[in-house]
Image (spheres, rainbow, N blue to C red):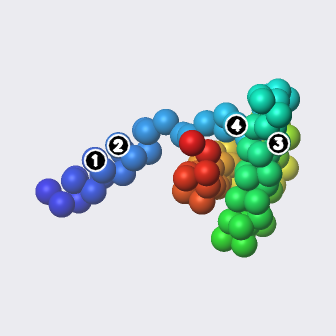
Amino acid sequence: MTVNQGRDFRRRVATRPLPGAAGLSDFADEAADGFDEAGHRRALVARGLELIRPEFGERAWAAFERVVVRGEPAVEVAHALGITANAVYLARHRVLTRLRREIEGFLE
């Protein structure tokens, strides 16, 4: 029974939608009332990425950067890095989740 409970839990977690990359690569270049909101968001995301970078291995970071920042297809990135496409999606998910935790109070 415990084994089945564990499998059910992992299945539920695995089928949750991945966090999107919205807000990381497509910043609007609009200024409101003299305050550059897009510039602030870019600086905040860049600083957050600097802070969390040491927590991830080279392959995971390269996969994240190529898929999210450069917009390359996950399958191509996986092939180039010698990992599975699933590993690319997991790296993307882990980095985005960690980034959101790092900057969550600043983007409200």
SS category of the residue bearing label 1: helix
Name the front one of labels 1 and 3: 3
* Neighbourhood count class around disc 3 (C-alpha, 10 Å): few under 14, some 14–19, many 20 upward: some
Q: Are marks 1 and 2 in contact (CB under 8 Å)?
A: yes
Query: As shown in the figure, which amino acid type bears the numbered disc 2?
Result: Arg
Mark 1–mark 3 distance (CA, rounded to whole Å): 43 Å
Query: Label for residue 12?
Result: 2
Q: Earlier in the sequence, mark 1 or mark 3?
A: 1
Query: Label 3 amino acid?
Result: Gly
Q: Across the whole image, how many numbered discs are drawn on residues?
A: 4
Across and down, in percent, residue 1 comes to 14, 57
Mark earlier in primary sequence (2, 3): 2
- Spatial CA span between label 3 and label 4: 12 Å
Query: Does 21 sit above or below residue 78?
Result: above
- Dot 1 crowding, Cα within 10 Å, few <14, some 14–19, many 20+: few
Q: Mark 1 points at which residue?
A: 8
Q: Residues within 10 Å of mark 2 (few under 14, many from 20)?
A: few
As drawn, the label of residue 23 is: 4
Is disc 4 surrounded by few (<14), some (14 to 19) or many (20+) residues within 10 Å?
few
For label 4, the SS is: loop
The tag on residue 39 is 3
Residue 35, above or below 86: above
Contact? badges 2 and 3 (CB < 8 Å): no
Query: Looking at the picture, which amino acid does disc 4 mark?
Result: Gly
Question: Of all residues shown, which one is farthest toward the bottom?
Answer: 54
Picture layout, residue 95 above or below residue 108: below
